[in-house]
Amino acid sequence: MNKKLKTEAVDHLFQAVLTLKDINECYIFFEDVCTVNELLSLSQRYEVAKMLRAGKTYLEIAEKTGASTATISRVNRSLNYGNDGYDMVFARLDEDEK
């Protein structure tokens, strides 16, 4: 975990997110907290990560998501050298689907 990221303010934000009960509440909260472009960027990175894990090529991902190769590369680096946050979420979502 990035020590620069771990602050009391970030803790408060994450605690607030953990209180959200469903997708509708997420929309309500995140529309207040983030700009439309910030939300679209976050969701784009998540879609890129899913496609990378599914073995899609950079070209396929760029065409489907509109992400730049730089964004795809950054997400790929997070998948390979990050904190395994994407994989943790993917595994939980897979469990929920079963």
Image: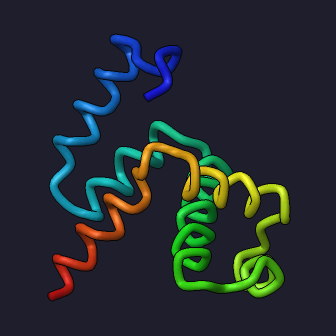
Residue 96 placement: quadrant: bottom left
Say which of 63 and 40 sits in front: 63
Residue furthest out toward the top: 8
Q: Position of residue 72 (x, y in %)?
A: 74, 63
Residue 18 placement: quadrant: top left
Q: Residue at x 62, y 70 (%)?
A: 48
Q: Position of residue 34 (x, y in %)?
A: 54, 41
Q: Residue at x 72, y 80 (%)?
A: 61
Q: Is residue 16 above or below residue 61?
A: above
Q: Is residue 75 above or below residue 8?
A: below
Please say which color scheme the image uses.
rainbow
Residue furthest out toward the front: 81
Q: Is residue 52 above or below residue 69?
A: below
Q: Residue at x 16, y 41 (%)?
A: 19
Q: Position of residue 41 (x, y in %)?
A: 65, 55
Name the quadrant of the C terminus: bottom left
Image check: 67 left or right of 1?
right
Name the quadrant of the N terminus: top left
Q: Give the total of numbered labels.
A: 0
Q: Position of residue 88 (x, y in %)?
A: 32, 58
